[in-house]
Amino acid sequence: MKQDRFCVIMCGGVGSRFWPYSRTAMPKQFIDFLGTGRSLLQLTYDRLADIIPTENIILLTNERYSSIIQEQLPDIKPNQILLEPVMRNTAPCNAWAAWHIKAINPNAKIMVAPSDHLILRQNDFNECVLKAFDFIEKNDAIVTFGIKPNRPETGYGYIQEGEHFDEAFSKVKTFTEKPNKELANVFLESGEFFWNSGMFFWGVDAIINAMRTHAPEIAEVFDHAGDIYNTNQEQEIINKLYGTCPNVSVDYAVMEKSSNTYVEKVDFGWSDLGTWGSIYDNAPKNRDANVTPNSKVLAFDSHNNVIAAQGDKLVVVSGINGYVIADTPDALLIVPINDEQKIKNYVNEAKTHFGDKFM
């Protein structure tokens, strides 16, 4: 049974909210943000290798990151890395992974995991993963992890639970993309909503059938490719066809439309390390409540900051409270932590004015 269990790690994003550290050439998933000596991708792999056979771990990424992955994860073979020729969001990449894995094992059950999440309690995580695999092995179901919210977070999507299947699983009633603060408060107070973790479980036939039913324009691309999966011709044919897929998330293409979608309500110390603020929440703090990952910092009368500087540069600050200060050789970001959701807009402005020079 364990040999039928696969994991797809999605690691092709750019992570613009972590600019200027996260760049196109070296996105956040390949960076050691927490000062552990391991990148976020390596931490994700370490966590999953406890549960999934190494040969059944598939990496989905952009073709430019192949060498970085092989350097950071030497146990992963080149044929375990699927290289997207262009970025098309999470529905096409998960479709490709499903068709690819079906050619390897028609009975496969798949877990999909982002490469940039933090899990604090490994044993609890393992238990929830095994429970999800057991559920999809016994039921024609698609499962997502739902995290019980502890604040009205506007940076996450939300899942509303419907009819209870048992203590751990419920049917999904609705999905909601990132809400405003007022709506997030309503969700929190109702007790019916959970953060969408972006981790999914499905049988290979379940997700392929769901794609054919709810996203036929995507399924047709991979059906049209024929018997090329898990062969030497696969990458060449995918390079030709992949760009014809629509740019759409798997949540919108499949999860929101399927009638057999369930949420497993989990609690294992989860955080989506999507912003500098999430690094502040989860990284070790010094006596002034500052986070200074792998950086030389002297802080005077300064508290509750994230201060990060690449290289051997010394950063000296005075009278700074509640800020992100991120310094690289060619760019410096100084922004209040409370305004961190605007960083993506600032990056777009930088691209408009300076092109790709600082991207």
Image: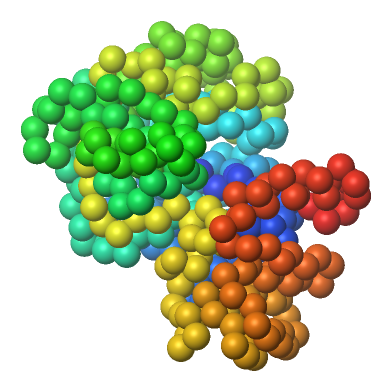
* Residue at the image position 77 percent from the left and 44 percent from the top: 348
* Residue at the image position 44 percent from the left and 16 percent from the top: 211
Q: Position of residue 177 (x, y in %)?
A: 47, 31
Relative height, residue 48 to residue 220 (above, below):
below
* Residue at the image position 69 percent from the left and 69 percent from the top: 326
Q: Nearer the viewer, residue 273 or 189?
A: 189
Q: Position of residue 195 (x, y in %)?
A: 35, 42
Q: Is residue 24 left or right of residue 231?
A: right
Q: Which scheme is used to colour this image of the protein?
A: rainbow
Q: Residue furthest left?
A: 166
Quadrant location, the N terminus: top left
Q: Is residue 5 left or right of residue 216?
A: left
Q: Is residue 174 left or right of residue 170?
A: right
Residue 3, quarter of picture: top left
Q: Residue furthest right?
A: 354
| Residue 81 seen anywhere in this rendered image of the structure | no
Q: Nearer the viewer, residue 1 or 251?
A: 251
Q: Nearer the viewer, residue 316 or 120?
A: 316
Q: How many numbered tags mark residues here? A: 0
| Residue 209 seen anywhere in this rendered image of the structure | yes
Q: Position of residue 239 (x, y in %)?
A: 69, 28
* Residue at the image position 61 percent from the left and 55 percent from the top: 339
Relative height, residue 312 to residue 23 (above, below):
below
Q: Position of residue 242 (x, y in %)?
A: 65, 24
Q: Is residue 70 left or right of residue 150?
A: right
Relative height, residue 46 to residue 248 (above, below):
below
Relative height, residue 341 to residue 90 (above, below):
below
